[in-house]
């Protein structure tokens, strides 16, 4: 059942594919194009602010993940800390309910499960090109090409953007992004597949700062079994 949840809901493997596009370079002209598509001046301003805040800036955050399998009415939660940097570099440290890590330096992807003395290793580029969310997080140009975008909700504290896939994809139908109107930080990202399953990540304690390259490298512990991912 746990493996079904992971495969159905888009584990952090899927989501780390999801996160690279939000933080890829976006110029002002592209941001204005998105704003015009939205037909919303506030949306245009927020998108431009996101570009200024996230482009070329490394950052870290605490996260809480909630995954829901609609057909079986199952909900799983997890939490930990994550680090991000350009280009496509990420590290997810899961602290609860079980400790494990997902690391990519933009070229190699490692998934480390210390309780099993197991490391899964694969080509990060293949994962960025395939799977739900991969196109979205690879770069902002792909996002504009593959998704329609609209302002879903506006409050005094945040604005939410709904991205809908233009092509049929059972693993990913929509992505909902909630952004702070004051700090312009991305507070929450929720993906939904064609079955109604959702995976939501909420980010807190976000810090923008330079990231040491070593954070996104991984040395396989001696004695660990290695599984190569196609």
Image (cartoon, helix red, strand yellow):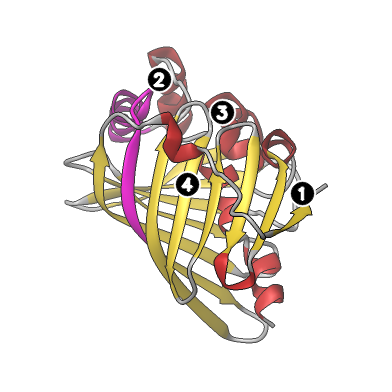
Residue 173 position (above or below residue 194): above
Query: Where, by quadrant of the figure, is residue 7 drawn?
Result: bottom right
Query: Where, by quadrant of the figure, is residue 93 drawn?
Result: bottom left
Q: Nearer the viewer, residue 76 or 157?
A: 76
Q: Is residue 21 left or right of residue 212?
A: right
Give the mark toward the camera: 1 or 4.
Answer: 4
* Residue that mark 3 sits on: 139
- Earlier in the chain: of badge 4 and badge 3, it is 4
Give the mark toward the camera: 4 or 3.
Answer: 4
Q: Tell me if mark 3 has few (under 14), some (14-19) or many (20+) residues whose alpha carbon lies within 10 angstroms of its own.
A: many
Query: SS at mark 2?
Result: helix
What quarter of the picture does the N terminus occupy? bottom right
Q: Where is residue 166 in the image (x, y as percent from the top left)?
A: 69, 41
Give the mark toward the camera: 3 or 2.
Answer: 3
Region in magenta: 40-64
- Earlier in the chain: of badge 3 and badge 2, it is 2
Cα separation, mark 1 vs mark 4, equals 30 Å
- Earlier in the chain: of badge 2 and badge 4, it is 2
- Residue at left offset 55%, top offset 52%: 102
Q: Is residue 162 left or right of residue 17?
A: left
* Residue that mark 4 sits on: 91
Q: Residue 168 carries which label?
A: 1
- Earlier in the chain: of badge 1 and badge 3, it is 3
């Amino acid at each position: 059942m746990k493996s079904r949840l992971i495969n159905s809901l888009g584990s952090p493997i899927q989501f780390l594919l999801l996160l690279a596009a939000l933080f890829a370079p976006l110029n002002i002209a592209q941001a204005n194009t998105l704003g015009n598509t939205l037909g919303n001046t506030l949306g245009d301003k927020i998108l431009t602010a996101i570009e200024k805040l996230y482009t070329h800036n490394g950052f870290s955050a605490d996260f809480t993940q909630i995954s829901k399998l609609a057909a079986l009415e199952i909900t799983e939660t997890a939490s930990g800390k994550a680090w991000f940097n350009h280009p496509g570099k990420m590290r997810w440290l899961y602290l609860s309910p079980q400790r494990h890590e997902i690391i990519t330096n933009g070229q190699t992807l490692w998934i480390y499960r210390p309780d099993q003395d197991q490391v899964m290793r694969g080509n990060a580029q293949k994962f960025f090109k395939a799977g739900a969310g991969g196109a979205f997080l690879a770069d902002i140009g792909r996002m504009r090409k593959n998704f329609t975008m609209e302002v879903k909700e506006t409050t005094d504290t945040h604005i939410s953007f709904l991205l809908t896939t233009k092509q049929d994809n059972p693993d990913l139908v929509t992505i909902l992004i909630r952004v702070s109107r004051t700090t312009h930080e991305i507070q929450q990202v929720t993906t939904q597949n064609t079955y109604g399953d959702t995976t939501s990540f909420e980010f807190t304690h976000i810090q923008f700062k330079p990231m040491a390259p070593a954070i996104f490298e991984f040395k396989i512990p001696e004695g660990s079994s290695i599984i190569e991912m196609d």
